[in-house]
Amino acid sequence: TIILACTKQRLSTPRMVKTTFSDLIEFQYLYQTGNVPSGVIIDTYEIKYRSDGNMITGYIHKPKDNKKYPAIVYNRGGNRDFGTIDQGQLENHRNLAAHGYIVLASQLRGNIFSQGRDEFGGKDLNDILQIIKIAKTLPFVKDQMVGLHGVSRGGMNAYQISRMSDEIKSVSVVGASVDIRDSHSYRPEKYTKVHQPIIGDSIKYKAEYDKRSACLWAKEINEPLLILHGKDDPRNKVQYIEKMIVELEKHSNHFEHHFFKNGNHGLSSHADQRDSLIADWHGKFLN
């Protein structure tokens, strides 16, 4: 049974496939297919893959044709069950795919979709490294070219992956923290409800907080980097992001930044401009 909704189709029951796109994928099905607003037909697959023995849920979005495209791995925000990828986020991924990309995303570990424990930038980074590896095995990814995009916590993770891996060619972030301790003064609940329970005490585990704070090791970010941030972001205030720009300039990193007046945390306030900048940025380095 296929349910039609405007120009898109949501499959009411999983359409099973006998084979998967990659030996690294244990299970996949066509979750959604149909036009995005630009008119391009995008197929969205839900996948299951292993990371450190955990079964992780992810997604692959691809234009419905037989061409090869570069890939972008899209890193989600939030923590644990908060911020897991929902239909709204899937639509953002599908719209990005319509610009001529294969877009992959992971729910990460430690939530209702995936096994394991969320470490907010700890071993969960292996979930991202594994989906990058999957991207490079896909027959419809052009020349194993992979970029990385992250929103909020996903931006923090994108910085971390840039530091750890040479398997990506470009990076973009939206609303990303550059030192996770910055928010403790104006969002104390972020520390008491998220950072302390997941990472531990910020003094005893200072090294763990440092690992999640890109401004301390900006010189190790080697890929071309695009930073997008709202000037009215209440979660990661823009004045703290400016110190990242200073550090990047010290080390002559290849980067570009845009701060948006009246821009909110995820820049949904400037969605068209945001999405155009992201697509164009990766296009410079992946094509």
Image (tube, rainbow, N blue to C red):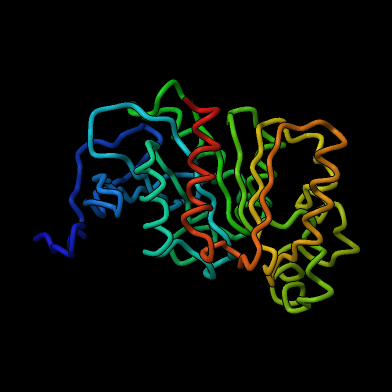
Residue 92 x %, y %: 42, 55
Q: Left of 145 or right of it: where is 180?
A: right
| Residue at the image position 35 percent from the left and 45 percent from the top | 61
Q: Is residue 106 left or right of residue 210?
A: left
- When asked about the image quadrant of residue 159, the answer is top right
Q: Residue furthest right?
A: 203
Residue beneath the point at 19% across and 39% down = 18
Coordinates of residue 140 in the picture (x, y in percent): 33, 28
* In the rendered image, the vertical position of residue 187 relative to residue 208, given as above or below: below
Residue drawn where x is 76% and y is 53% of the image: 178
At x 38% / y 43%, what residue is drawn? 97
| Residue 27 percent location from the top left of the image | 31, 45
- Estimate the x, y position of residue 287 in percent, counting from the top left: 47, 25
Which residue occupies the extreme left position in the image? 1
Which of the pair 7/164 is nearer the observer? Answer: 7
Residue 162 seen by the camera = yes
Eyeballing the image, is 268 above or below 39?
below
Q: Quadrant of residue 191?
A: bottom right
